[in-house]
Amino acid sequence: KHVYFFETVSSTQTIAKQFIPLKAKEGTLIIAEEQTAGRGRMARKWYSQKGGLWFSVIVKPNIPIKIAPQLTLLTAVAVVRAIKDVLPLQPKIKWPNDILINGKKVCGILTELQSANGSIEAIIIGVGMNVNQGKNNFPKDIRPIATSIFAESGNTIDLFSLLKAFCVHFEQLYEQYLQHGFKEIQTLWEQNCDTIGKEVVATTIRETIDGKVIGISEEGALLIKKENGKVSEIFSADLTN
Ligand code: BTN
């Protein structure tokens, strides 16, 4: 319906933001074949040459800003389902938003808020999926941690089938979320997550916390039980084992 396809853009996130003042409809999708300035979390560069699926979805839910991270988790569930639809793979979610296959990252999600007067005007959910790139297409420094669906399965995937599968699942989960809230999504997320129960080191901008992951909060924060028994709620961090 509201799909905009580009061959080359700086970043679909940037383009999506330009659509918002133009009263972009809920569910507007901006997709590009390649990005010259793809962005990841924490101001990182996101490598996005041809062969991957790079897109941003604009949604406009009527929810408080505090719970907006829930949509990142919802999106992660939709990505896992979409990959499973096209191939018999077992992708796992690594909090908050990485999708891993065999322990390596195939997909990242970047959620950005556009707010006005303390309420949400739009949420832009950026999804980057490594699909048909070969192992050696990745820059050397990320080769140990990055992978693609092709690299893990030997199958070349039709990008549009994968995108369509994502859209079907996203729409279904988003409707469910608007009607019934986050609880059901949280359960689905936890079922597909491989972070829960693990000992991790979480590095935030302020501190480093280590302990055992016991779950996520309703806002989508990671709950880590420290050695002293106290539980820390973490909204943004990098996790290592
Ligand atoms: C991360 O894991 O750091 C998030 C990566 C998000 C990448 C996607 S690709 C489509 C959209 N446009 C961008 O510039 N970034 C997101």
Image: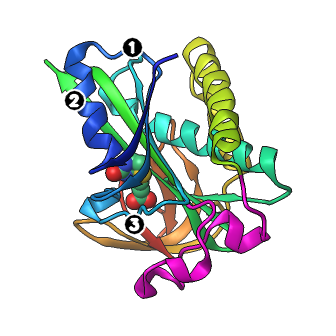
Residue extent of the magenta highlight = 130-157
- Whether tag 2 and tag 1 are in contact, CB under 8 A, the answer is no
Q: Which residue is mark 3?
A: 47
Q: Position of residue 219 (x, y in %)?
A: 45, 37
> First in sequence: mark 2 or mark 1?
2
Left or right: where does residue 200 sit relative to residue 112? Answer: right
Count of numbered badges drawn on the protein = 3
At label 3, the amino acid type is: Tyr
Q: Name the residue: 78% across, 71% down.
A: 154
Q: What kind of element bears circle 1? A: loop
Q: Which residue is mark 2?
A: 18
At label 2, the amino acid type is: Gln
Q: Position of residue 184 (x, y in %)?
A: 68, 29
Residue 231 shows in the view? no
Q: What kind of element bears circle 3? A: loop
Q: Which mark is residue 134?
A: none
